Image (spheres, rainbow, N blue to C red):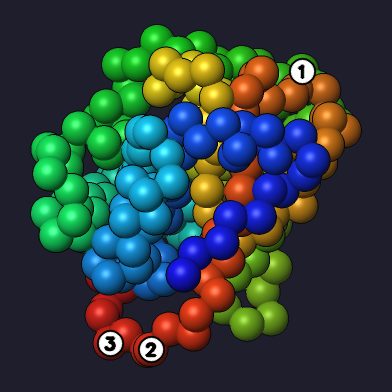
Amino acid sequence: MLRPLPLTEHCADPLSRAEHVCLGVSPFNSHFTVDRIAGLARWAMSNFLRFHFFVPDGPSAFTLEALGYDSVRAAQKAQRQGNYTRNKIIRALEQVYAGDPRSVILDSSKLENDRSYLSLLSEAHGRFATDQAFAEQCLGATNWVLDKRLPEGERPNRDQLRCAVRYFLAELPMFIGTVAVAGVASSVFAYHQRVGFLERLYRGELSWRPLPGQGFVILENTVPETASAERPE
């Protein structure tokens, strides 16, 4: 059973309104098996009027470049993993959802033509370029992500962080304004891990703040899961 925990007090109201939830599914993360994704969909449909899955597939190439892949190979690998992740979501939704699975997946191909997303993405890059304190917070969040992908004992250098941060900046519009992208009055973004940057964001400690009606919840599984043998790629 999934239990949503509001990230901050600010997030409790969008959760209680139960209008929309956006479920983040990270490429290259073996946590997201077909069974888990199906469970997320069941939970979303039981507790919210509408839902979407968000897959930052294209931007994952920036993380791969920071790890040493050339840009062409990074893009190819990101595309393959994006297809794999998208297909898992489709297979999961085919089990539990009566509608077209593709209609509730927000991936790069869909968001690259979304005006609300692109406007927020432009603002994310603008703030990163002009607000040093905000930029350092973004780089700190990127360090948390990239550090887990490097060999033991290695730490990301500044160039790697500035390359990989483009992945985080591509995610930021969904944390700031899923309400705008989905065209709803209230929404929560749901993920299974707590991120320090987002706690500061939703407490209003950064120069950029979430749009009205936007919240974030951490999904806690209250029932132990059995191990899955599914490969991450």
Q: Callout 3: helix, strand or loop? A: loop
Q: Amino acid at mark 3?
A: Ala
The residue that disc 1 covers is 130
- Residue 233, position in %: x, y? 26, 70
Quarter-of-image position of residue 36: bottom left
Q: Residue at 68%, 25% (x, y): give it.
A: 210
Q: CA distance from mark 1 to mark 2?
A: 47 Å
The answer to whether residue 219 is visible is: yes
Residue 134 left/right relative to 103: right
- Residue 202, position in %: x, y? 76, 36
Q: CA distance from mark 3 to mark 2?
A: 10 Å
Q: Residue at 59%, 39% (x, y): give it.
A: 15
Q: Callout 1: helix, strand or loop? A: helix
Identify the disc placed on residue 226: 2
Q: Amino acid at mark 2?
A: Thr
Residue 56 left/right relative to 75: right
Quarter-of-image position of residue 169: top right
The residue that disc 3 covers is 229
Residue 122 left/right relative to 95: right
